[in-house]
Amino acid sequence: MAGSGVAHLRRDEGPVLAVENLVVEFPAGRGQTVHAVSDISFDLMPGETLGIVGESGCGKSTAGRAVLQLPSPKSGSVEIDGIELTTLSPSALRKIRAQMQMIMQDPISSLNPRRKVKHLVTEGPRMWGQRNKERLDQLGRELLQAVGLDPDMVWDRLPGELSGGQCQRVCIARAMMLKPKVLICDEPVSSLDVSVQAQILNLLEQTKTEFELTMIFIAHNMAVVKNISDRVMVMYLGKVCEIAPSRDMEQQAQHPYSQLLLASIPDPDVLRGEADATPQIEGDLPSPLNPPSGCRFRTRCPLATDRCADEEPLLREVAPEHFVACHNV
Amino acid sequence: MSSNEPILTVDGVSTRFRTKRGQLRAVEQVSLELDAGETLGLVGESGSGKSVLGQTIMGLVSNGGATTVTGTVNFMGRDMQGLTRKEQQQMWGNDIAMVFQDPMSALNPFKRIGTHITESLRAHLGLDKTQARERAIELLRKVRIPEPTRRIDQYPHELSGGMRQRVVIAMALACDPKLTIADEPTTALDVTVQKQILELLDSLRTEMGMAGILVSHDLGVVAGQTDRVAVMYAGRIVETAPTRQLFANPRHPYTEALLAAVPRLEQEPHTRLESIDGGLPDMTKPPTGCSFASRCKYAQAKCREVVPTLTASQDTAGARHPHEVACHFPLDGAADLGMPAAVGTENRELEVETI
């Protein structure tokens, strides 16, 4: 894997969001560079949900944030509705960012602990000059209701008085206040309990339909991603391994890394001593300061050959809408 | 000790904390047994009391001050709650050890990896400096840390999360304890690393014949690693059974709901998940009757009045480890859990969560 390439892009079909050859790097001192995201491309059709999966450090969050230009990528292009974001002036960018909202992993720390829910929810439009308090409050209450909170109950509460799941609902209501086009969810359910996770996943699905959103859903659990996405993109060390329709993920994932991720999900149906003999992949992620040459996954890959060290695989179509970057599958 | 005598017996343990809002009932009337070499999974949502139970068994939470512990914890013939501080120190790390959730805060950032492990070796086994170091290297090798001779002199921050958790496991295993309590050992780790760590823990437990308690909120983790499972809700054990039986035939509505809430790979994308609405009751004012009644879709009038007790199901009564459930109207027959039925997805209104 560790693939580049743009074979999977659907330029002619009018994507809402198109990201091409995105590169994000961070200086790491002593002249070193963290290669967080190296040349990835993806696009989203209106109303589509793209799931991004990978281990921590694979660049999935960085990719999500780079769409919002937080920070701006080193190179590559990000287009939303045909508007190129990477070259926009700061004030124009600020305006367009209102169309892209983000939901963070830790709902409690992403809300200001000293502000009441009513302020948190109405903050967005207030910043954009909406001064009509009645209108603001009404909208805020409607949205709280829409995310399954009782507005009268939570209106005057502080985030600390709410549970994790309730805070995540407030975050979703807050994001919806500005009527965004694109919603980026960065591990929105990773810190929640299974039962609350199910509530939030259902809510996101419902919100998406109701507000006609296009969504990027970032997570490390393949089963969660499969549940909510139309397409799944598997990332490893800043590169794309595989992009496939999510219904193909379970049976037809081809990249060895995708298979590793699939095999890692603890499955309540697999009991002790019955674990299937999936190829064990040992070791940790290599350092993004000095990623392996060629295919970046080759150091942990059971199929690796000499070719993988020399030549970087490109994404190629192996089935309709299913793209894999590997020399050996 | 004869082999069919359990090494751990927990009998009617309740743990309560005095808080500003009143007495918080964290653990209520929990009884369980654990045989040598057996692994028990404790499952439940956050706030269900599973960690507090683990700590009560360890003796990390004990009677006194704002805490009340009643009931008895008998480990290898000794009452864990009745130990003096000195006896506890001899016990901890030696006979009973704990693996904590967050490996970064379980390690002292100012101490080398080696120091963490040799500390207990020298205290409990009386090894000298060189012997302890040799044994520590051996332990690091056992938990499959590459280049143990180099790693032993490094500091925790130089290791990745997965490696740190391996070190924490090596610390717990240093003196060959009879029982390890692992409190969410993989929650802070990546899925791929989680699998490695769980398999490591399991193979070490089998190899060394240790008994184990695995505390986790993830049913998938527990399914693959344990012999028996106890499901906790609001401080009580609501269902306990051999792992296979519990997952094949959950009898408590809460267990069924938890299993149905997990997204599965076999499901089609956009399958609506069966969620449990609402939250745990306030344990400073526990409801009369079954604490799950307010969220239970099968609840009837009796459930709100009488607290159900753990009762063995008829077919397993009298077995060494019967399938016990605390429910007035337990479910029967294998529920179809892989594919939770989409109940009224069309016009389903959102329930408003009450606080």
Image (spheres, rainbow, N blue to C red):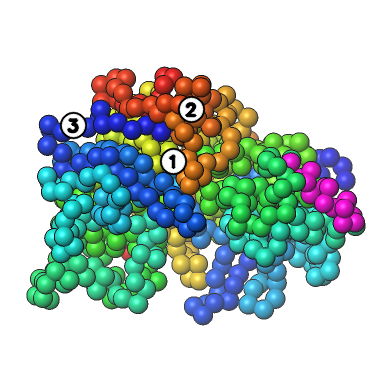
The type of residue carrying mark 1 is Leu
Looking at the image, residue A220 sits to the left or right of residue B99; the answer is: left
Location of mark 2 (residue): A309
Looking at the image, residue B251 sits to the left or right of residue B352; the answer is: right
Give the residues in magenta.
B127-141
The type of residue carrying mark 3 is Arg
Which quadrant would the C terminus of chain B be assigned to in this image? Answer: bottom left
Location of mark 3 (residue): A10
- Mark 1: give few (<14), some (14-19) or many (20+) Cα within 10 Å: many
Mark 3 or mark 2: which comes first in sequence? 3
Residue A289, percent from left and from top: 48, 47
Tell me how far mark 1 sits from mark 2, CA to CA.
15 Å
Question: To which chain does the residue with label 2 belong?
Answer: A
Which of label 1 and label 2 is nearer to you?
2
Location of mark 1 (residue): A237
Residue in the picture at 37% in, 31% down: A3
Q: Nearer the viewer, residue A96 or B89?
A: A96
Residue B287, percent from left and from top: 46, 65
Under circle 2, the secondary element is helix
The type of residue carrying mark 2 is Ala
- Mark 2: give few (<14), some (14-19) or many (20+) Cα within 10 Å: some
